[in-house]
Image (spheres, rainbow, N blue to C red):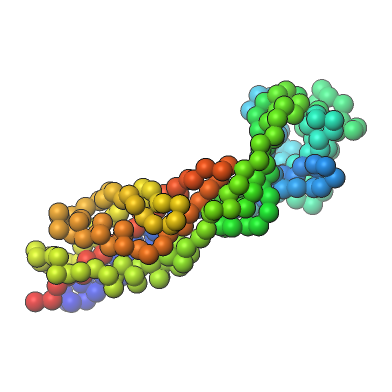
Amino acid sequence: MKMRIRVILRIVIFLFASLVIEHAYATAQAPDYLIYKGDTLAIYSNPLESFFAKEGRPDRVFDKYGYKSTACWRGYIGYWELRNDSLFLVKVRGASTNIDLSLIFKDRKTDHGVFADWVDSSIHIPCGRLVVSMYDGYGSIFEFEKELFFKQGVLTGIKEYDNSKSKSSRFTEDRSLLLKFIQENINYANIINNTDEDVRVLVEVRSVTPEGKIDSVQVVRGHDPERDKEAIRVVKSIPEWEVLFRSGKQIQRPWTIPVVFKKKDE
């Protein structure tokens, strides 16, 4: 009976460990589009949302015509156009039809689109090769990126960014490979104190070098100094890690890695 309970506990620990490193990603979102210099480009921005924040959201319209998909939580896809440096909303697409703009803009003319004078922010345009896929909103990293700045709907500036140093890692892409590496590289000679059950130490990756080497970690849930120290050593020994650049600057995606120390058999 005790043996069965121990087996069950080990299974639970393994499953929980898997859940820890499996990020709770939101679903990747369908983008809006911008007609820019003759091209129709996906954008990582939703300028219509700032209008709704000021004027209220027409929920009844989207309940009737909008998308009912986790891949489009906002319920629509907006199509925008830059005309002589002025931003216009030209179309709002619902689940199976275009939504009449007059249902959204009660007090504006909509025959030729709507001038987006409420936009006082920037629009991000991913460009080039997809480097790292992420499944949280607009998280995926592309090789290059443009940022268009607007003031009251008028283009005021453009910046271009190079994210090409970004790279994925087999250890962040393959959970089973990561867990296998950790188990095979724990040095139990560094552990003197025995325990009656498996022990899990959680280690957070805090920073990575541009070359993909983990250089800073922190124990977020420890057990004892010996195992905490060994967990840090093992995680920092992972030979490669993902490198992410967004808007030309290196960013760090949060990762918490479980290091499971097996009970030593008597």
Q: Quadrant of the N terminus?
A: bottom left
Total numbered circles: 0
Residue that appears at 80% across and 29% down: 86
Q: Residue furthest right?
A: 111
Q: Is residue 92 visible?
A: no
Q: Position of residue 196 (x, y in %)?
A: 12, 67
Picture layout, residue 84 above or below residue 242: above
Q: Position of residue 149 (x, y in %)?
A: 68, 31
> What residue sits 71% from the left and 37% below the top?
60
Q: Quadrant of residue 63?
A: top right
Vertical placement of 75 versus 15: above or below?
Answer: above
- Please tell me which residue is depicted at 66% across the width and 41% down the height of the picture: 160
Q: Position of residue 88 (x, y in %)?
A: 81, 33
Q: Is 232 located above or below residue 152 in the figure?
A: below
Vertical placement of residue 130 versus 103, above or below: below
Q: Is residue 89 visible?
A: yes
Q: Quadrant of residue 187?
A: bottom left
Quarter the C terminus occupies: bottom left
> How far across and how far down the image is residue 172, in percent?
45, 62
Horizontally, is 201 left or right of 21 in the view?
left
Q: Residue at x 34, y 72 (%)?
A: 180
Q: Nearer the viewer, residue 107 or 175?
A: 175
Residue 159 or residue 44, whichever sits in front: 159
